[in-house]
Image (cartoon, helix red, strand yellow):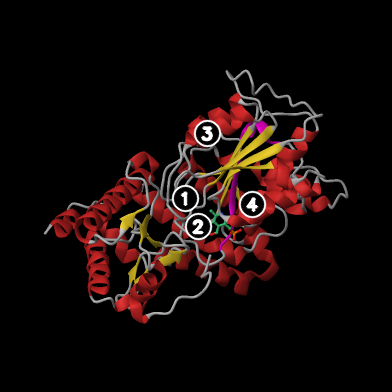
């Protein structure tokens, strides 16, 4: 049996024992919420114990002290995204981080400061302050990002209906990077290109370096939402010239529901005033002098806002350690092998289902979008049988065989279940809801 052979030669197979996925569940939803691991629960337990035993002294006397949690966990995440430790911090949530980072760079543009990148003439560090900056996005983005971007434009008196420029999709699933480049060529007011590293519905993975280069060529900053790739796909943000990025830790980083957000700001931008300033982003050495004037930390730490939620950050310490032990390159290799296997099985055995995720490895993130006209009911039938997937309108069942805890045999079982459901029309017994969960 192919699945068994693949599992036998999987160097990461033993990691599954360190995650708490119930035995009667095939968990294929780690792209929404990763499962608990022994390591994450242990680091959470440690902080709970510190709270009980040390009380307020935990900020300084816990081991390690809570005070530097944002920077410390940022250091742990930095290698996963190809950044130096001072460029990554954990804090806030994705949406809040979009607000503060896009706001910061809009303020820079309005002050006449553009991106600066060695070797790229257009990114010469200047912007014509008479030009109201536009933000370039795409129509398949996660909606919360657009809400935040529109609000940031509005708050600066810029009309989002005009200046949030949206690259359309040709097929409703993917965005052709050439269309991003064409939009940049067509409009000379784009000051920020804000793109996902991977689309939340189809799982299309973008060439971050190509998009960043196109942005800089057009004199625009390049920002990314890496929610659907951080922890699953290795990134090289520094080498790619990314200006800033945001991501969450509750998906592929397995730090728990609503766990703390993360962000990257390239070193060349350190020292800027964050749009949403708060005391936790103050220069650390003088934070407790309680000055009324804000002095930004000289690192990505400046974009923290208020007191970090320790209990929502604590599991990340253990969960990242586990991923680092597995190795991001080995995780990515296994993830591609798992999604290859899934796609091949779907092609072979499920004629009513089509694959909406790009087949090229370079354009595929960590999950596979299975399209079926009755996707919502199919998803409900699968969940009812312990195959945990999710549905995204209009017709997508997302299946995520996440590398750290999924076996090839699990993927085979998922396809067996889908085939059995569709053959028996068992999904027809399930109701659809208007809209569904987003
Ligand atoms: C791509 C993407 N961006 C933004 C968000 C919103 O994140 P948050 O609720 O943490 O602000 C999500 C949530 O799943 C997401 O998938």
Q: Give the residues in magenta.
A: 259-270
Q: Is residue 57 toward the left or the right of residue 199 in the image?
A: right
Task: Check whether the beta carbons of the residues at disc 1 and disc 3 lie within 8 A of each other.
Answer: no
The dot on residue 211 is 3
Query: Residue sitting at 48 percent across and 50 percent down?
Result: 199
Residue 162 pos. (x, y %): 72, 42
The dot on residue 172 is 1
Q: Give the quarter the ligand 1 occupies.
A: bottom right
Task: Check whether the beta carbons of the residues at disc 4 and disc 2 lie within 8 A of each other.
Answer: no
- Mark 2 crowdedness (10 Å alpha carbons): few <14, some 14-19, many ≥20: many
Q: Nearer the viewer, mark 3 or mark 2?
A: 3
Q: Would you place residue 157 above or below residue 383 in this image?
A: above
Residue 246 pos. (x, y %): 58, 48
Secondary structure of residue under mark 1:
loop
Q: CA distance from mark 2 to mark 1?
A: 38 Å
| Location of mark 2 (residue) | 317
The dot on residue 146 is 4
First in sequence: mark 2 vs mark 1: 1
Q: Nearer the viewer, mark 2 or mark 1?
A: 1
Q: CA distance from mark 4 to mark 2?
A: 30 Å
First in sequence: mark 4 vs mark 3: 4
């Amino acid at each position: 049996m192919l699945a068994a052979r693949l599992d036998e030669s999987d160097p990461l197979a033993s990691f599954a024992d360190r995650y708490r996925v119930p035995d009667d569940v095939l968990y294929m939803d780690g792209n929404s919420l990763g499962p608990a691991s022994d390591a994450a629960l242990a680091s959470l337990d440690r902080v709970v114990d510190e709270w009980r035993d040390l009380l307020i002294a935990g900020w300084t006397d816990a081991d390690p002290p809570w005070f530097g949690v944002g920077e410390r966990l940022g250091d742990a995440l930095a290698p996963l995204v190809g950044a130096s430790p001072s460029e990554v911090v954990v804090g806030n949530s994705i949406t809040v981080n979009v607000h503060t980072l896009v706001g910061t760079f809009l303020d820079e543009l309005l002050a006449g400061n553009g991106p600066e990148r060695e070797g790229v003439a257009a990114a010469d560090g200047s912007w014509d302050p008479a030009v109201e900056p536009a933000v370039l996005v795409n129509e398949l983005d996660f909606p919360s990002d657009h809400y935040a971007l529109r609000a940031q434009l509005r708050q600066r008196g810029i009309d989002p209906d005009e200046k949030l420029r949206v690259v359309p999709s040709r097929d409703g699933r993917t965005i052709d990077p050439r269309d991003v480049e064409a939009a940049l060529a067509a409009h000379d007011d784009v000051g920020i290109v804000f793109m996902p590293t991977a689309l939340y519905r189809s799982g299309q993975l973008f060439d971050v370096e190509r998009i960043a280069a196109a942005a800089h060529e057009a004199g625009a900053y390049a920002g990314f939402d890496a929610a659907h790739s951080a922890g699953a796909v290795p990134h090289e943000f520094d080498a790619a010239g990314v200006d800033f990025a945001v991501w969450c830790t509750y998906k592929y980083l397995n730090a728990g529901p609503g766990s703390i957000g993360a962000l990257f700001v390239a070193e060349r931008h350190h020292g800027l005033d964050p749009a949403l300033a708060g005391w936790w982003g103050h220069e650390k050495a003088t934070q407790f002098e309680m000055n009324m004037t804000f002095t930004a930390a000289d690192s990505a730490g400046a974009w923290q806002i208020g007191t970090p939620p320790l209990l929502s950050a604590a599991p990340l310490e253990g969960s990242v350690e586990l991923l680092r032990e597995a190795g991001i390159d080995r995780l990515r290799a296994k993830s591609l092998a798992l999604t290859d296997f899934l796609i091949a099985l779907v092609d072979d055995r499920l004629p009513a289902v089509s694959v909406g995720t790009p087949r090229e490895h370079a354009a595929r993130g960590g999950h596979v979008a299975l399209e079926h006209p009755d996707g919502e009911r199919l998803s409900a039938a699968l969940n009812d049988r312990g195959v945990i997937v999710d549905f995204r309108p209009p017709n997508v069942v997302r299946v995520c065989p996440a590398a750290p805890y999924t076996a090839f045999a699990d993927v085979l079982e998922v396809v067996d279940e889908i085939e059995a459901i569709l053959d028996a029309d068992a999904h027809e017994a399930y109701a659809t809801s208007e809209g569904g969960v987003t």
